Image: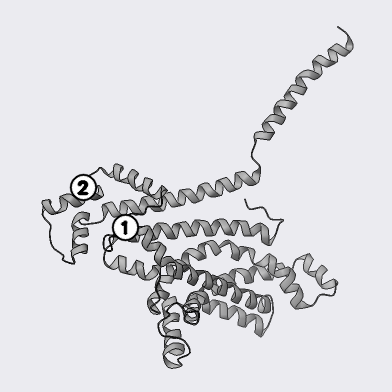
Amino acid sequence: MTLSDSTIEKEAPSSSVGAKRGGEARWRPSPTVTRWLGRIGSGVFVLWAAATVTFFLQVLAPGDRATLLLNLSSGQSRERTPDEIAPINAQYGFDDSIWQQYLHYLQGLLHGDLGTSYQLQESVTTIIADQVGPTLVLTFSALVVAWLIVLVLTTLTAGRRGFWGGAGSFIETVNAGLPQYWIGSILLVVFAINLGWFPVESGTGLWGLVLPVLTLAIPLSGFLGQIARDEFARALDQPFVLTARSRGLGDLSVRSRHVLRHSVLPAVTVSGWAMGALLSGAVIAETVFARAGIGQTLVAAASSRDVPLVGGIVVFVAFIYVIANLVVDALYTVIDPRIEVP
């Protein structure tokens, strides 16, 4: 065997190993794909947990479901005979085992079926689709207004000593502690009833949206502002601020163009949670201002013990919460491309 043959034999295994490793690398998903698959998997788990809890609350709720359904449809509250409830049990599958009902419920969710309302005798999915529009407009508008308040107040007052810094911190603390129902009632009495600037009943117009939006946005702006303010003060001490000032940039320009981008990231983190909180708060705003939406539907369903409709709304809110958190994760890299969400 020649030296060249020996060299080939020694190099051949390493070449095949390299090819094998190269083949494995091609099939390995990137860290970004792995991260997003994990995020989506977590979201699916949250939806499954919400749906599971909702189902067992329906099954374990006190009282016979067939009797409750008959009483709601007839408007009469009385005991029902076995002959009366037998067709209802057969129609809705109440006679099946709990696990059979659970699997049927999950199968329906995969096809967008949230069940049938006891009181309205309509698909829960259809009812939510008809009522969710005004609620989503209200919640998204409130989130935008809350962030506008945070950006303006934080940029102008955060990190300052003296009156303006204290005033900004005081306003945020007060706003964060204000109950939504109290704010809505005060806004309604002062600006709608006494001054007549806004309609007493919100309706569907843009002008009637102002007071409900402020009812939800003011407390949220205080909460988000407190988070952004602390981070803003820390960012002011970073070296890049000194570099920006040395280039001749004014104080407001440094704050708005450089410091603000770094300080809002912690507040952006909780914006996904804020969407869920706003959907819950929409119940209060829609009740105070007599505004149509999913909040009013939830109140009516809870009052009449329409369990499938209440459960469907809970699952829908969980879905919005999951989507909002995925959007927040995506915004991280938009705000600061150097950050990689874990």
Q: Is residue 64 visible?
A: no
Please tell me how crowded label 2 is: few (under 14), some (14-19), or many (20+) other residues with Cα within 10 Å.
Answer: few
Name the foreground residue: 35 vs 236: 35
Which quadrant does the N terminus fall into? top right
Q: Is residue 285 left or right of residue 273?
A: left
Q: Earlier in the sequence, mark 2 or mark 1?
A: 2
Alpha carbons under labels 2 and 1: distance apart:
17 Å
Q: Which residue is mark 2?
A: 90
Q: Residue at x 35, y 66 (%)?
A: 298
The answer to whether residue 128 is seen in the rendering is yes
Residue 308's tag is 1
Mark 2 or mark 1: which is in front?
2
Name the amino acid type tagged 1. Answer: Pro
Q: Position of residue 251 (x, y in %)?
A: 76, 77
Question: How far from the left and from the top, in percent, is residue 317?
Answer: 44, 60
Left or right: residue 210 versus residue 25 is: left
Query: At 42% across and 79% down in the image, what residue appears?
Result: 203
- Residue 135 pos. (x, y %): 45, 69
Of residue 29 and residue 57, the one placed in the foreground of this image is 29
Examine the rendered structure and indicate whether residue 224 appears above or below residue 316: below
Does 255 sit above or below residue 198? Answer: above
Seen at 73% across and 26% down, the residue is: 19
SS under mark 1 = helix
